[in-house]
Image (tube, rainbow, N blue to C red):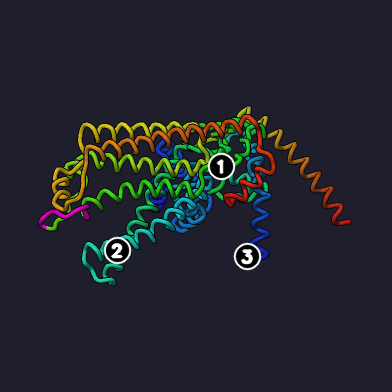
Amino acid sequence: MNDLIDRYLWAVSRHLPASVRTDVTDELRGTIADTVDARSTGDADAATREVLLELGDPEALARSYEAHPRYLIGPAVFDDFKRVVTAILVVVLPLVLVVMTVVNIGIEDESLPAAFLHAAVSTGMVGIQVVFWTGLVFVIIERTGADPGGETTSGAEAWDPDQLAPLPPVRQIGVPELLWGLGVAAVAIGWLPYQHVRGFVDDDEGNAVPLLDPELWSGWIPAFIALMLAAAVLEILKFRAGRWTLPLTVANAFLDAVLAAYFVVVFTRVGVENPDFAAAMAEHGDVWEPGVIGPVVLALILAVLVWDAVDGVRQHRSLADTGTRGPAPREELAQSGAGNGRP
Amino acid sequence: MSDDEVLAGHLQEIRRGSVVLACLAVLREPQYGYALLSTLEKDGFSVDANTLYPLLRRLEKQGLLTSEWNTDESRPRKFYRVSPLGEQLRDEMAREWADLGACIQSILRGVNS
């Protein structure tokens, strides 16, 4: 009989926070004993069984003793999570399926059915990765309480209508911006193994010669991939906020600065070009002027990065301007609402 | 969902707040968990044990109850007692309860007549 009570208490205590575990268990032990004493008219075992049945599932009982959330992604961010995951999957999965099928036929020399089957498996894996990583980002948003939407009311201060944020005249960052941002990151990452395996020209033995120095794979290219993943996370956060908030603008400019520094170092100090590349090009009689193309590419990249950072600041300031002006005029609202399909 | 289940759900909603008020009233005198449950049942409040015991903890955490372990007897028991803050809130809740009762009465008179 006592064995049953001990087992029950142990099952409850497993789900209790350590700070109250002993106290709650001791109290429950006394309470159960009291109840059994009052009930039992001889058969203590049956009474114990009955009392435990009334207390119910130990896990449910333990849950009613604490107030911590027992979910990964709460209602406040769930809608955004669903939208982001759907948007990414709808665009990325068909793309992966097509690209992988082509790659499997073109590079791996597979038959169409085999190529398609293998591509489908890869697509499934990509889908799982997308859901997992997006989920992880949202779990972190949920845990850290980052809530740019201002929807939580858990703060100690009483809510006041004056705290309502002014209506954004336009949702600055919608699904197109999200897909564009993620697409750029995905292409930037995907191009690296592509040029490595597929190459740009063939050497005299018919092997593909990559454009980028294979040595870079030992550190510089993984670093670039990490930066691109950070950019992808930033894109999701931007979409979640819907607007160029100050932290997002600063983070964006910072990431641009890091990328600019990275490219300057890689282009001028480390060197990007595969040493075998120029020779392979010359064999084919193609013109290759690394002294010209390198600086031009670097200048283009830097121009894009500067433009991106400046554009972020500009958008943030236009947001701040409307904030001080108050709500946008009605016509403007109606137009912008129709323009990007928000209810 | 049957009509009985719907009714049971609504009755539970009505009773929910009353248990807190009843606890704050009964615990003028210190009592331990099972004794409190018996007292409430005797007075006509049917409360489930697995609702009452966690509730006592929450009220204690909110500062409406204080508790003390009594180890004088062979079985250690945790005694709860209403705090000064709890008394104050109990009186306000009691007033609200009376007002609500009067309102319900007056509305129902309109229905029945």
- The structure residue drawn at horizontal position 49% and vertical position 51%, both measured from the top left corner, is A36
Q: Position of residue A277 (x, y in %)?
A: 17, 46
> What amino acid is found at the position of numbered circle 3 in the picture?
Met
Q: Are marks 3 and 2 on the same chain?
A: no
Residue carrying label 1 = B55
The span picked out in magenta is A198-205
Q: Which residue in the rendered view is the most extreme toward the right?
A: B113
Q: Indicate the chain on which mark 2 is placed.
A: A
Instruction: Report if residue A203 lies within the magenta region.
Output: yes
- Measured along the vertical axis of the image, is residue A82 above or below residue B1? above
Number of residues whose C-alpha sits closer than 10 Å to that of mark 1, classed few (under 14), some (14–19) or many (20 or more)? some
Q: Secondary structure at mark 3?
A: loop
- A63 or A91: nearer the viewer: A91
Residue carrying label 3 = B1
Instruction: Report whether residue A111 is seen.
Output: yes
Q: Indicate the chain on which mark 1 is placed.
A: B
Q: Secondary structure at mark 2?
A: helix
- Measured along the vertical axis of the image, is residue B68 above or below residue A334? above
Instruction: Report if residue A23 lies within the magenta region.
Output: no
> Viewer-nearest of labels 3 and 2?
2
Q: Secondary structure at mark 1?
A: helix
Number of residues whose C-alpha sits closer than 10 Å to that of mark 3, classed few (under 14), some (14–19) or many (20 or more)? few
Q: Which residue in the rendered view is the most extreme toward the left?
A: A205
- The structure residue drawn at horizontal position 22% and vertical position 40%, both measured from the top left corner, is A290
Q: Are marks 2 and 1 on the same chain?
A: no
